[in-house]
Image (cartoon, rainbow, N blue to C red):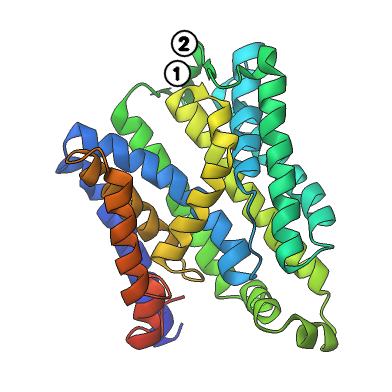
Amino acid sequence: MTGSGKRSLTLHIGVLVLLFLLPFILPDYHQLVITRIMILAIFALGYNILFGYAGLLSLGHAMFFACGLYAAGLPVYHLGWEVPLAFLFAIVISALAAALIGAIALRTQGVAFMIVTLMFAQAVYLGTLYFSDVTGADEGLVLPEHARSFDALGMRVDLTSPEVRYYIALALLSAAVLMVCRWVNGGLGREWVAVRENESRTRMLGYNTFLIKLKAMVISGTFSGGAGAAYGLLFAYVGSTFASIQYSIDALLFTLLGGAGTVLGPILGSFIMFYLVDFFSGHTTAYLLATGVVLILLIMYFPLGVLGTLRKKWLPWLP
């Protein structure tokens, strides 16, 4: 491993260790907030694969988050499935949905791709509202008591415990970060970047650019669906709000704030956005305006996102 690779690995492991230690010093409120942030950071990590590395701007990624959310929550609510089985089922369904939608949407480019993904996302959102008897629509569904615990490795896992939820979220985030690090530093990541930088030249060199983009779409959708499934199961709630365009915009915003095309960027962006809203909402009713002003300043001084700008100026080894 090169010196840059060692520094990168040390940084990423250090961030995960810091997150592991935070519950020992933070009050319960922040523990709950960070649990939610970590799950949504996985969503943003998935989005970053498609946007930051493959260069494909989607406006409909909430559909994958919602796909995982409902694929995990509905079998638990209506069929009494156990939590681990529901989570694995959601992962498979999310991957299949991403492959199907990707096979259609990736036949377009640029603005057309954005519109097609937005149309698919709106169809999913309207479907959750239309089939309200099953999905609960805007009111949503609260998962039953049996979904609040499950057996694993001979132990009883209690999802009502804030500490248990926190460390499950951290375990999922850690797995996601390590997988993304491996991919973006390997051949697959180089293929994504090649397509992002010059798709025509990549195709001329003999690469199947459609297949490269489809891989990015499937992995991205699977990560996003896994985040949705984890969110629904950990917090025992599914609802149509999570399929709205707002969640697609959130994933884009998290990625842009932290730095598109950096592994830790979406995680940092998630923390920045959540705590900005949390801070200003405690001091003013115009918290969205105040948050917007701070975001404008961040974009002015960090045009490539926080980590993207740091990588360009001082830390070129950041993946």
Q: Position of residue 54 (x, y in %)?
A: 65, 70
| Residue 123 placement: quadrant | top right
**Mark 1 — residue?**
148
Residue 279, image x, y percentages:
21, 45
Q: Amino acid at mark 2?
A: Glu
> Local crowd at mark 1 within 10 Å, few (<14), some, or many (≥20)?
some
Whether residue 133 is visible = yes
Using the image, determine if residue 287 lies above or below residue 116. above
Rendered position, 96 above or below 85 = below
Q: Are marks 2 and 1 in contact (CB under 8 Å)?
A: yes
Location of mark 2 (residue): 145
Inspect the image, locate mark 1, and give the three-letter code of the amino acid beneath it: Arg
Q: Secondary structure at mark 2?
A: helix
Q: Which of the pair 303/83 is nearer the observer?
A: 303
Residue 65, horizontal then vertical, whole percent: 59, 41
Q: Looking at the image, is 143 positioned above or below residue 52?
A: above
- Left or right of 190: which side holds 110? right
